[in-house]
Amino acid sequence: MPPSAPPSARAWQRMLSGRRLDLLDPSPLDVEINDIAHGLARVARWNGQTSGDHALSVAQHSLLVEDIFRRSNPKASLDDLLMALLHDAPEYVIGDMISPFKAIVGGGYKVVEKRLEAAVHLRFGLPAHPNAALKSAIKKADMISAYFEATVLAGFSELEARKFFGQPKGFTRDTLMIEPLPAAQAQQAFLDRFETIEQQRSHGERAKA
């Protein structure tokens, strides 16, 4: 008798909320902010190669990027701020791959990332993806954050960081919350910022600094 076919590979992840998120076809109904915050607070930036007693989490990085974006774009809408905060949300499922590794992996990674981004955004009443101008503005904030993370925590010289991330303008190290937080604190800070933006959105308020 021919050997039986192997069982199909599991393509979903069980979340602490009890949700089962399909990685190939993620549903917005299976996205929970507590799962996102918990996961991002436990994913290390720079593959954990940072100084200090705690890893710099993607949750804290997300707060940094949203802070930089908000201060750089005072007319940004609340939806824009939320997309900035959630710009790395797919990493609560797929982790934080450093840029050189993403380049090696290629397009497959991006396909999964885009599907997860759409599911997260739709769950919270946002467009599936940011438009080109918003994506560029968030990326600029992301690069500013990366510059300071690289030079303060990840052992890059300023010359090396400028080569990869550009020279940040309008921000200095002392104006940013760069010291890595314990995971539980980063998780709560992320949730607090999310709830602040959501409350303002629900009341139809304008974005506040």
Image: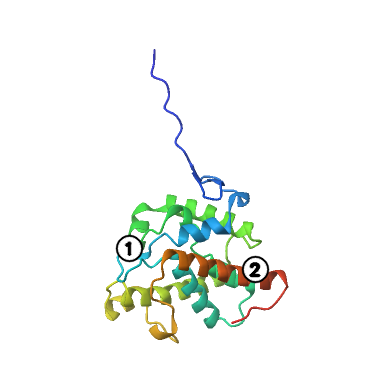
Mark 2 secondary-structure assignment: helix
Using the image, determine if residue 174 lies above or below residue 161.
below
Relative placement, left or right, of 111 versus 152 is: right
Residue found at x 38% / y 64%: 45
Q: Residues within 10 Å of mark 1 (few under 14, many from 20)?
A: few
Kindly identify which residue carries mark 1. Answer: 48
Location of residue 78 with respect to 1 vertically, above or below: below
The percent position of residue 95, horizontal first and vertical second, equals: 42, 56
Q: Residue at x 53, y 68 (%)?
A: 85
Q: CA distance from mark 2 to mark 1?
A: 31 Å
Q: Amino acid at mark 2?
A: Glu
Residue 101 occupies quadrant: bottom left
Q: Quadrant of residue 49?
A: bottom left
Coordinates of residue 56 in the picture (x, y in percent): 38, 68
| Residue 59 in view, yes or no | no
Secondary structure of the residue carrying tag 1 is helix
Residue extending farthest top: 1
Looking at the image, residue 203 sits to the left or right of residue 52; the answer is right
Residue at the spot of label 2 = 198
- Nearest the camera: 82 or 192? 192
Nearer-N-terminus badge (2/1): 1
Which one is nearer the viewer's eye here, 182 or 141?
182
Residue placed at 43% from the left, 24% from the top? Answer: 5
- Three-letter amino acid code at the position of disc 1: Gly
Q: Nearer the viewer, residue 115 or 54?
A: 54
Residue 146, image quadrant:
bottom left
Considering the image in quadrants, where does the N terminus appear? top left
Is any atom of residue 183 visible in this view? yes
- Image x and y of residue 20, in percent: 55, 44
